[in-house]
Image (cartoon, rainbow, N blue to C red):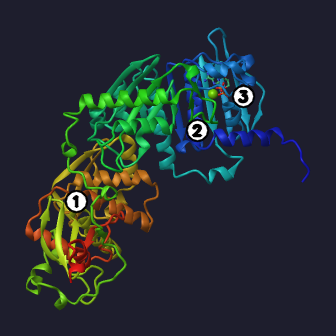
Amino acid sequence: MPIRLLSSEVASQIAAGEVVERPASVVKELLENALDAGAKNVTISIADAGRTLVEVADDGVGIPSNELELAVSRHATSKLAQSEDLFHIMTLGFRGEALASIGSVSRMTITSRVKSAEEGARLHIEGGKASRLEKVGAPIGTVVRVEDLFYNVPARLKFLKSDVTERRIIDSLVTRYALAYPNVRFKLVEGKQVSLQTAGDGDRRAILAALYGVDVAKQMLEVIAEEEGKALTGFISPTSLTRSNRREITFFINGRWVQDSALNTALLQAYHTLLMVGRYPLSALFLTIPPEEVDVNVHPTKAEVRFRSQDKVFSFVQRSTRKALLAYTPIPSVSPQLWGPRPAPMERREVGIDWSIAHDDRQFSVESDQLPGTSNESEVTSDKSLSVDSQLVTRRPETFSPVPLLRLIGQIGATYLVAEGPDGLYLIDQHAAHERVLFEKLMAQHNAKQIPSQALLNPAIVTLPPQSSKMLLSQLPFLNRFGFEVEEFGSNTFQVRAMPVLFTGGEAEAALRALVEDFEEDETPLQTEVEARLAARVCKRLAVKAGQVLSNEEQRALLTDLEACQSPRTCPHGRPTMIHLSVDMLERQFGRRGAR
Ligand code: ADP
Ligand code: MG
């Protein structure tokens, strides 16, 4: 093909690809325009999770009729005049691209009126082509109505996620902006349903409750710090409140929501040694720095930024958040036991001798009569399970097992079981082992399509943030198949009425929260591997913890159950359940080998 200039339609569709990825991108751009226009009230209406409609109405300064056509053309902006301005940006927008981009991939109608004008004007753009300007009566401010997003680029529609997910992204975006601009009244509606409405009275904690639920909002710690022209305000979670991913770490810089790995790291460092491995804090932090200290023009959606002196910003954020954290955390400098028992992460295993992790590839094929100390065997194989349902224990195949039969010696540190096997000593991590046991039992029942469930004497009542509630509501039938009976119990509140028999005695609330966390991680929790992951997560929450003293019976039952597992040597998340110290190794360590 010969080289030719792209038509302006194609060029703007390409440009739109950078800015407009999904309905939430439209919401973001329009919201930012409304905020830049000094709006005090912003109403966002969506239909079909934004696919067929996103409308943002504001009471900002408006666009003069004679500039309306310009506003929707590319590289047209009122926020920037010369290139130097790029380094003192005080507005959210400046690229002059959003309206043009959105207009090229949707049917967009923009109506606006400025204070000094008697009437407003309206322009309709379809696939990038503008209609004639119409004079209309309109209140002061701007309404941008975006219908049928991607109607002319159907390929892009295929990249959208489920309605539940798209809606969740919009919800979380609007809520975060509401949090950043507590003096603006935000309203988000879909049909008749209002998903968010803020008072605009500057009360951030109330908005925090809309984002995370009242319980969590109450616990969040406030950060207020100032230094050399920089200020940091907002909220961070106490060490007792964590998530399994970084998704709830939110940073705004000069009123702009950014994803910046350096800022994330600064925050995580503030929590250093205070959180378990793999747990992350929640944050809604608002950083204000002189505009010339930050370059926002490095990313099409302006989600990433560059700092002039990153080290200073980093250290300011790290110090201020650490200070806030310690101010609220009782006796922070003493040992980590304060924050509850922590499972010893395997990476930190430091032992002088060469302990081998017991997932070696040798398969043991041990008949019970080969077992040393056979007199104990009846105890070892006693049929008591840690849970009530002894009849559900899958028996170990008689002649072959991937772990040898073990003779229990006892428990140490309320965390590990010590056992003797045919070839030396085994240390078993009780939590990891129990996780494995629960997991295999649950999956076996699930595959047999019968997870017996048991009604709870005291149904647990759990309140969730609105976004999580919506997610959970859509998954109730699925939970049912997993043996959980959960019902809606008022707004954003659920009642857990029954749990799988396997988990009898476990905390229903912890289980439900584990499930919700899992749904949030993946919006299609219907495939087998996802079900397994979900099961693994619940088992993790409900397995016995490190630090929990187990009776002899319970210790034995755990060993027996572990022996019966298909993959007893790792927990469902892949960490080892046991460490093996072979006779051979013991002999070498004690210098017996050479002596013989
Ligand atoms: P940018 O925000 O980067 O300037 P946009 O394409 O989003 O580019 O908007 C182009 C121009 O249209 C803005 O510079 C502003 O002057 C005007 N405009 C857009 N939306 C609004 C609004 N809601 N209220 C007032 N003016 C607006
Ligand atoms: Mg803009």
Q: Secondary structure at mark 3?
A: loop
Residue 53 placed where, x, y %?
59, 39
Identify the residue under disc 2: 25
- Pick whichever, 221 or 342, lies toward us: 342
Q: Nearer the viewer, residue 572 or 4?
A: 572
Q: Earlier in the sequence, mark 3 or mark 1?
A: 3
The circle on residue 557 is: none
Position of residue 566 measured from the top left corner of the image (x, y, whole percent): 32, 77
Give coordinates of residue 457: x percent, y percent.
Answer: 13, 57
- The residue at 35%/35% (across/down) is 270
Q: Looking at the rendering, which quadrant does residue 13 occupy?
A: top right
Above or below, 542 against 363 in this view is above
* Quadrant placement of the C terminus: bottom left
Mark pair 2, 3: CA separation:
17 Å
- Identify whether 497 is placed above or below 212: below
In the image: residue 399, left or right of residue 108:
left
Residue 548 versus residue 145 in the image, above or below: below
Q: Looking at this rendering, what residue extends furthest in the top direction?
A: 116
Badge 3 residue CB within 8 Å of ligand 1:
yes
**Number of other residues with Cα within 10 Å of mark 2, as a class: few under 14, some 14 to 19, many 20 or more:** some
Q: Is residue 164 left or right of residue 148?
A: left
In the picture of the structure, the residue carrying the numbered disc 1 is 498
